[in-house]
Image: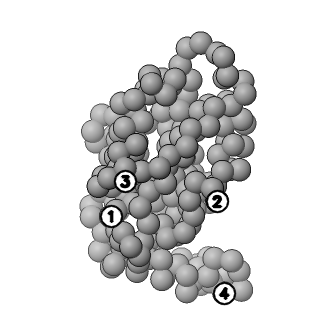
Amino acid sequence: MPGAQGPLTARLYTPAALVGRTGPAGLLVFFHGGGMVYGDLDSHDALCRVLAEGARVQVLAVDYRRAPEAPFPAGVEDAWAAYRWAVGNATELGADSMRTAVGVDSSGGYLAASVALRAAEAGVACRLQLLVYTVTDLAEESESRRRYGAGFFLTTEFIERARGWTSGSSALPGWCTGF
């Protein structure tokens, strides 16, 4: 599928309940987590399979450009391009363009929120956001970051490193703030 600056790899999951069914299905466009630095289609394959089967919707998992090779706003722009493509090509995917949604885990939450805001501004269908332990605030310190920033899988050190790689600063464009 086309991204903001070139092709992106994607994977379409169709649940067993929809195989052989006539008529369009709902479509969840999924962006993986990983601090917008790590993760890919394979690291989130099991989660996408569970989402497709459990929700009985198609899941289109998209592998966007990641930092540090592609710093902010590369991932955000790829997510928006991928979502617009999915809505515009819903029929070819066997989906209903009016029953599209965006779903994510972890840092993908930032991508989903950006897509949902841009979709609303552009009049593009986005029925809902599925946000699983998401990141939507890259600029603020929080009590949980202070309390649990060391000794756990997601450390303050990693968050700060990923934030620097992905945004380059805490000054974000207007459409990325206010989540």
In front: label 2 or label 1: 2
> Label 3, on which residue?
78
* Crowd rating for badge 3 (residues with CA inside 10 Å; few <14, some 14–19, many 20+): many
Choose the circle earlier in sequence order: 2 or 1. 2
Secondary structure category for the residue under label 3 = helix
Residue at the spot 27% in from the left edge and 64% down from the top edge? 173
In front: label 3 or label 1: 3
CA gap, disc 2 and disc 3: 19 Å
Residue 112 in the image: state x and y as whole percent.
Answer: 46, 51
Q: How many marks?
A: 4
Task: Using the rendered view, name the quadrant where residue 145 is placed.
Answer: bottom right
Does the residue at mark 3 contact the one at mark 1 (Cβ under 8 Å)?
no
Disc sitting over residue 73 in the figure:
1
Residue at the spot 50% in from the left edge and 46% down from the top edge? 10
Q: Is residue 44 visible?
A: yes
Does the residue at mark 3 contact the one at mark 4 (Cβ under 8 Å)?
no
Q: Amino acid at mark 3?
A: Asp
> Label 4, on which residue?
150
Above or below 153: residue 17 = above
Does the residue at mark 2 contact the one at mark 3 (Cβ under 8 Å)?
no
Choose the circle earlier in sequence order: 4 or 2. 2
Q: Quadrant of the C terminus?
A: bottom left
Choose the circle earlier in sequence order: 2 or 3. 2
Q: Amino acid at mark 2?
A: Ser
CA gap, disc 1 and disc 4: 28 Å
CA gap, disc 3 and disc 1: 9 Å
Secondary structure category for the residue under label 4 = loop
Task: Using the rendered view, name the quadrant where residue 22 is placed.
Answer: top right
> Label 2, on which residue?
43
